[in-house]
Image (cartoon, grey):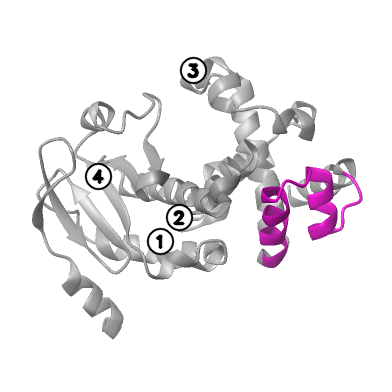
Amino acid sequence: MRLPCALAVLLALWTAAPARAGEGEWRQSDSFHFSVFHENPWLSGGFSLGLENLHSRLRRDLSSMAPWMSSERVKVYIYKDRASYLKGRFQPPRWSNGLAIPQERAVAVHEGRDKKKLFSVLAHELTHLIFESFWGKAGRPPAWLNEGLAMVEEAEAGDIPRSSGWHSAMQNLPPRSYFSMAELERTSPGEDLNAAQVKNNPKIEIWYTQSYSLVYFLTRQNSSFKFKSFCSYLRSGKSLKESLWLSYRYRSVPKFEEAWKKWLGASH
């Protein structure tokens, strides 16, 4: 099949050149929207095209919140393995597979055997980077909203989004295990649920699954305009109740929860 002209230009742009990323000798490869720093001498086959395809999809969903996406390159640091990633200058949490670095407009990940997993991690971290830039001086977005959106984009990095682990977990979420919105809002998984010990804390999976489900409902069952409006109201300091009313016309937080649970039950 003949490649579109734009793709041919894209592939021509990728070049390898020595670069310093803070720990030893790296290589740098540039595309339209990324500067990729990699410890291994070469990027894996198809990586450049996959990364640009990911950017195109994220831009469709999130560019209204981050106009800079069309003109600025994001730095992507790809460590050669997990050990190198954990010892790197960004000092990531030991349980993590990727990290967003907003102050550098960069993300850091590590190579692995599973290429699909790498792109899922990139989708997750790039979403954090883009979404947090929308908040700007207002601080970071609510944890459930930030993680939920990142998981929605992560799940859709695969071939069939509905076959993703998060989508399956959402459909199997026991109704009695739900957090109330008040509890979900005041919980931060890294601080309150001990994200480093997931296997010993079933609540963390429930928190992440519920966050994914709520944001999936807000974004995929409603218009992107409403979601941006909702986030804008939250960013301006309005309460969850006010933001839900002004953007989605839910008269109260319980009414929103009721609508979400009704949709979730119907989607099983």
Amino acid carrying label 4: it is Ile
* Label 3 with label 4: CB-CB less than 8 Å: no
Amino acid carrying label 2: it is Ala
Number of labelled discs? 4
Expressed as whole percent of the image width and height from the top left, the position of residue 191 reads 56, 21
Looking at the image, is mark 2 or mark 4 earlier in the sequence? 4
In the picture of the structure, the residue carrying the numbered disc 2 is 157
Q: Can residue 180 be seen in this view?
A: no
In the picture of the structure, the residue carrying the numbered disc 3 is 197
Looking at the image, is mark 3 or mark 2 earlier in the sequence? 2
Q: Report how far apart the C-alphas of labels 2 and 4 lie in the structure.
A: 18 Å
Looking at the image, is mark 1 or mark 2 earlier in the sequence? 1
Amino acid carrying label 3: it is Gln
Q: What stretch is highlighted in magenta?
A: 225-252
Q: Report how far apart the C-alphas of labels 4 and 1 lie in the structure.
A: 16 Å
Expressed as whole percent of the image width and height from the top left, the position of residue 176 reads 79, 27
Label 2: few (<14), some or many (≥20) within 10 Å? many
User: Please, what secondary structure does the residue beneath circle 2 have?
Assistant: loop
Identify the disc placed on residue 54.
Answer: 1
Is 246 positioned to the left or the right of 128 in the image? right
User: Please, what secondary structure does the residue beneath circle 3 have?
Assistant: helix
Which of the two residues, 247 or 174, is positioned nearer the viewer here?
Answer: 247
Which of the two residues, 111 or 66, is positioned nearer the viewer here?
Answer: 66
Identify the disc placed on residue 112.
Answer: none
Which of the two residues, 84 or 234, is positioned nearer the viewer here?
Answer: 234
Prevailing secondary structure class for the magenta stretch in the rendered image: helix
In the picture of the structure, the residue carrying the numbered disc 4 is 78
Q: Is residue 28 visible?
A: yes
